[in-house]
Every structure is written in C-alpha cells, then in structure tokens.
Image: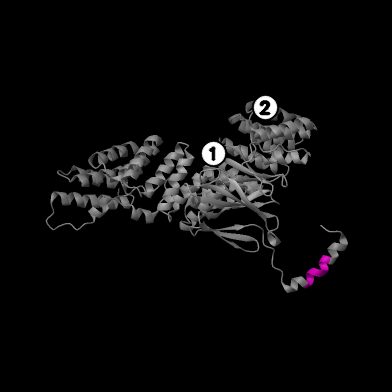
Amino acid sequence: MLRGLTCKALGTACLAGLLALALCPVPQAVAKEDVTLLRAREGAAALLRGQYEKAIGILDRALSEPEIADFVKASIYSDRGIAKWRLKRTKEAIDDFNQSIAISPENATVYNNRGNALLDLGHPEEAVKDFDRAIALSPNYGVAYNNRGNAHEALGEHDAAFQDFRKAVELMPNSAVVLNGRGKSHAELKRYHAGIRDYSRALQLDPRCAPCYTNRGEAYLAIGKYKEAAADFSQSLSIKPDNPDLLLSRAKAYNGANNYRAAETDLDKLIELEPDRVAAYMERGKVRTASYRKEEDAIEDLTHAIALAPTAEAYALRAEAKLKAERPNQALTDALEAVSLAPDDAFASRMRGDVYRALERDNDAIDAYRAALKHDPFDEDAREALLAMDQEVPPAEGTPLGPPVSGWVIKELEPSRYVAVNDEYPAVRAEIEMFGSGKPKILQWSLLESGLKGIGLLRYYAGSFSSGSDSDLVYVAIVDLWAKKVVAVEPYSWGSNSADWTWAPYSVAVTDPAGNTNEVQLRRPRPAVSQTAREYERPRQRRRRSGGGGGLFDWLLR
C-alpha cells in the first residue's frame, strides 16, 4: 500500500470545493458567513502548509459560527477530518467525515477520504463500500479507483485490484502513483515483467518515487535480475537512509549478484539497528555460507536465528552451511528436522537431497529432489540437480493447453499460473504472464541470429478484456536459451493495435500501443576495438592458439 507518497500535480487537481469557495472575493460589508469563509480560507492555507494543528483550531472556530450554509459546513468538516487523519487521529477523522456526509451525502470526495481512513483502521470491506459510493457518484474518479484497488489488495482480491488499478491508469495515465499501484497488482499476480514496465514508467514521471524504486527492486529480485535490484534499492536508500527493510532487500540482491562483502555490510548495519531481526541473521547466514571460508560464521548466525525462531528454513539453511563445512552427518540431522517441521516445503526437501547426494545416497537424493519439484514445480535448483545426476526430470504436471507449436506446449501448474515447456530445451521453463480472461495459447516460436543468437521469441495469446477479437491481447516472452530463463514479457498487439519493436544489435525497444517504450537489453555489447588495437590483436591471438587456449486534499492516492 502506498503511504505518504505526495504528488503535487494531483494535489492541485484534486482540491475540494472549499478552496475555490475560500478564494472567492469577499464583499466589503463582512457578514457572519463571510467571516466563516475567511476562517475556512485560513484553515485551507494552514493545511496546505502542513500545519495540521493550526488548521484544526481555525476550522473549529469556523464551525462555531452560527447559521453556516450547509455546503460550507460539510466542506469544513471534511477538511478538518483530513487534518486529523494527518495527525493519525483516524477515528476522530472518521467522525468528521460522517458529519460531512450527513450534511452533504452526494460528495464523492468525502466518501473517498472516509474509505482511506477505514482502510487505515483495518476495515477494507467497509472501505470498499465507500469507494464504491464515490465511484457511483463520480464514474471517472480515478483516485477512488486507485484507492479501491488498495482495499482489494488488502483483502487479497488481486484480480479485482488489478481491474481497479487498470481503470485508474486509464483515467490518470500520467500519475506515478496509480502506475505504481498497478505494478504492485501485477507483482501480486506473479506478473513481474509487467510490474517492472509500470514501475519504470512511474519513475519516468516521478524520479523521486521511493516506493516505485523499492517495488521495482522486489520485482527484479523475483526474476533474478540482482544487479538491477540492488541499484533500485540503493536509490530507495538514498531517499530513506538506513531503512531496515531496504537494507535487507539490498543485501538479498547483493547476495544474488555474488557481491558478498556488500551484502554482509548491509546485514551488519541491519543487525545493529534491529538485533532481534530473525531474517537478518538468516540472510547473513546465507551470505557467509556462499562466501569463502565463512561456514562457521554462517552456522553461528543460523544457530542464533533458530534460537529466535526455529523454522524449517533456518534448519535447512544451517544444513547447507554444515554441508559446506564438510559435516554432512550433522547437516543431515538439520535437513531432516527441516522436513519434519515443513513436509511440503520444497527448499527443505531439496536441501535433504543435497545432503544425501554428499553422503553418496543417490537414490534417496533423487527421491528428495523429485519431492521438491512436486512441492514447487518452479524449483530450478532441484531440476538442475536431477539433470546433473543424469536423471529424467519429471514432466510438468497438468494437461497441455492446446497442440504443440514448434515443440512448445503450455501447462497450468497452479491456478492461473502457466509455464511453457519444450522437450528440445528440457532445462527451460518459460513462465507465461496473462493479462486478461481466458487461457494462454502459443501462436509462434522464432529464433534470432547473429548477435542475438540463443534468444527466442515465444508469441502467445495473453487473454482478453472483453468479448470480441478486437480486445485480444498478444504478448511475447523473450526467452534466453543460454541463461535458461525469460528475459522479458512484452506486448505484441492489443486488439487491432500493434506494438512497435525496434531492434538494435544487442537489444530491442518495445513501444506498446499506448506509446510507452521499454528497452530490453538482451546481450552485452562487444567492446569496440580500435584499429591500433586490432594491429596488436592478431599476434596475441596466434600466441594463444600455439599455447593451447583458455475535499481540499482528496488524500490524492495511497
């Protein structure tokens, strides 16, 4: 949920009626109502400056005046409610919104504001009702769609949330806040590539959007783009220094990028800030296990984590550290404890397989790896372990959705989660992102050449937003066969509107039908070699060969 994110442009656009009223010319003969308007204007100015206590005092005096017009009183109650919300006096804020609605029940802004307050108090069901009412009163109210999306997310209703964020983006295409919201919705639905596109577009609009960097970093982390994730978390930390959650996330990214020293530095700082943070000890244990000759330090960290919270993951991680420390029998004890605590945990089963393999109990190892894949069909480490043991990898479960296309078939491994597989590339499992109703269908597979050799384009039907072929969505999964992963998922066409794909020697820029461009780096460019360097290059190459080679404030959006 986006909290505390300001957007000045939207702030100006979403002012309630009170500000316009307060700025109206006041006649020379000041009547009682004119005094109220003057005080309302003072309260509005105080709110704009962030002087919430002062604003409440001024608005209190305005409300004490007799014979105030109802529409003025309703606006004052609404704005005083927002001032109280800013001071985290949420229940009092709701009381003011209730008063405003009782006087003027047709004001969409106040329902939106009360919905946000209810969401803060942990009542998302009631919040949805208020956002529903706001949208019924004002069908093009993009802010309310965004906030209702947040309420649906709080209820775990991710599909409904996505539809609301999609509508909010349609109504407010230049809002970083709503793009960030839709990106979060994509990520909740495991559509990380789509989320990254939205976060990137949001950051083009607002380069200071810390939540956008954080959320994009988490999406990069989920698809294994660790260097990009670390860069995004660093941007967030430049805005929010020493934030414990960001330090942990960046440490995970550094660890994934094999930058163990930087990861340990972040985790040391995190543990200084929060000495009992279990996740910090577990992550530092992972880092030290992967580092050179730090297995004993890793075991110490993971033992401390187990003392704080004896979870299956902590035992499995300690088994991994003990295995690296060449103590396989002790590792087996931890691995078995992990499986007993969480029999359906894929990581625990895989770790047990690693220990059995080290003990040369190959049949037990194979069974453990197969169990890991049964618990998590997306566990690539278990899959690679079986391949390394020259074992047949269990086929993806589920009935193929349609006939093969160039050997590719799609299977639904979990509800609404799809993977494309091809017997010709047994180590590749291309996860398919859907964007509308229906089931995916492979349309075409093509391989690239020259500098992009090893890259394939898997074009597929990605759903529809409504009936009729003109609403069909077609996307392309860009598959790196050498890295055995999907590099990006980009639009090909939305109905009759096609995306523009502009190719460069090592990358592609995809402009979707709405005009938004995303550049995807597919290969590292070869360094340019000068003519002088080429003259010296030839003899070196010959030597290598001979040697053998190497309201007023609509709360905007949450």
Density class for disc 2 (Cα within 10 Å; few <14, some 14-19, many ≥20) is many
* Residue 357 visible (yes or no): yes
Pinpoint residue 471: horizontal percent, then vertical percent.
49, 51
Outermost residue toward the right in this view = 546
Inspect the image, locate mark 2, and give the three-letter code of the amino acid beneath it. Answer: Glu
Residue 506 vs 400, above or below: the answer is below
Q: Is residue 46 left or right of residue 228?
A: left
Q: Alpha carbon of mark 1 to alpha carbon of mark 2: how far?
A: 28 Å
- For label 1, the crowd category at 10 Å Cα-Cα, with few meaning under 14, some 14 to 19 and many 20 or more, is few
- Residue bearing the label numbered 2: 337
Question: In percent of the image, x 37 and y 41: which residue is there?
Answer: 116
Question: From this viewpoint, which residue is outermost toward the top?
Answer: 340
Up-down: is 452 above or below 133? below
Residue 293 within the segment the image draws in magenta: no
Q: Element type at marker 1?
A: loop
Which is more toward the observer, 319 or 160?
160
Q: Earlier in the sequence, mark 1 or mark 2?
A: 1
Q: Which residue is mark 1?
A: 274
Which residue is nearer to you in this view: 459 or 318? 459
- In magenta, the rendered stretch is 535-541
User: Label 1 amino acid?
Assistant: Glu
Query: What sort of colour scheme is used for the picture?
Result: one colour
Evaluate whether residue 237 shows in this view.
no
Quarter the N terminus occupies: top left
- Residue 527 vs residue 423, the one in the foreground: 423
Residue 265 horizontal/vertical position (percent) = 61, 46
Q: Quadrant of residue 24?
A: bottom left
- Residue farthest toward the left in the current orientation of the protein: 29
